[in-house]
Amino acid sequence: MTRTNLMLCASLAALGFAASAANADKLTLYCSAEEEWCQAMARGFEDATGIDVNMTRKSSGETFAQLRAEASNPKGDVWWGGTGDPHLQAAEEGLSQEYISPMRDQLHPWAIAQAESAGNKTIGIYSGALGYGYNNDLLAANNLPEPACWKDLLKPEYKGHVQMANPNSSGTAYTTLASMVQLFGEDEGFEFMKGLHANINQYTKSGSAPIKAAGRGETTIGIVFMHDAVAQAVAGFPVTVVAPCEGTGYEIGSMSIIEGARNLEEAQKFYDWALSAEAQNLALEANSYQLMSNVNAQSSDKAPDMSKIKLIDYDFVKYGSSDERKRLLQKWDEEVSVLPQ
């Protein structure tokens, strides 16, 4: 065989390998849960199916913004995790697509209700109540009283001791804003947010960052979903978890297949697998303490007991709508974030 023929064969072989690699099963996953849980889900699906997963972790607000930016040329296949409000908004704006999984008969009613409210363009995968946690050592060192209610956080002695995320980037913080409006009424809810703003030392990008900072002793109080505070306490940090006395909002963490997904078959396989008890049990391995949507999924005795928490009747349809979300965030930007601290 001539040198030219050898080079031609090598080139053809390389092209064949490249084509094979390009055709290999793969999935692009956008994940809005904790990094450890996101990694567990990506690797678990790879192990279960042999499908390669390219996973990117961002907060739910950031991921929603990315879906919007990529709408004309979608790059992701599945969006898994994060608060349900932006998933509902994505469904409303045509950024996700309808899919009815054969796993639905294994789910709690609240997970299916989430799907039905969005034309089956999203579905509930976990639930968790909003609250806050505080660092016991810092509270004692600063001679501060133990807070038990939302309005306790407005007291002057907590100035500079409270941290929460920015509701523009964080689903947790948007749930906080929407919860205060529903709990106290819009006028009083915004007065609460203004009073809270005076005591905030930092608005973080990530929803769970405030309680991690509290665990490390960088802030005294972190407003988060209670399961994130539990995770810090279980990890050995001096954190006490609070279910506020007035009542509180909650999330239905959700999953959506992205409209225009390039790997639709793989996306549907992930969707079905992620609703299985086997996949949802990975939450405990990743030290996540939400209530999972599969009725057969395991739960930890350390997880917050939702039945014992005073929950508001959170209006997911209204506060997950594009117009309402945009209006509340704009009002927060114009009336709260600009105030001096």
Image (cartoon, grey):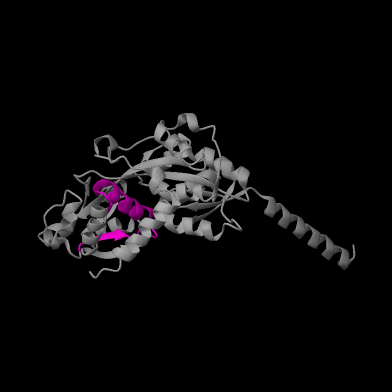
Give the quadrant of the C terminus.
Answer: bottom left
Classify 294 as above or below 337: above
Q: Which residue is situated farthest in the left direction here?
A: 143
Q: Position of residue 99 (x, y in %)?
A: 56, 39
Figure disc tally: 0
Q: Pick whichever, 54 or 339, lies toward us.
A: 339
Q: Position of residue 151 (x, y in %)?
A: 18, 53
Q: Is residue 262 magenta?
A: no
The quarter of the picture where residue 74 lies is bottom right
Q: Position of residue 211 (x, y in %)?
A: 28, 56
**316 to the left or right of 188:** right
Q: Which residue is situated farthest in the front direction here?
A: 187
In the image, the segment drawn in magenta is 161-186
Q: Position of residue 255 (x, y in %)?
A: 48, 45
The quarter of the picture where residue 330 lies is bottom left
Identify which residue is drawn at 20% across, 65% down: 160
Q: Pick whichever, 71 or 207, lies toward us.
A: 71
Classify 106 as above or below 330: above
**24 to the left or right of 10:** left
Q: Which residue is situated farthest in the right direction here?
A: 2
Give the quadrant of the N terminus.
Answer: bottom right
Q: Visible in this render: residue 297? A: no
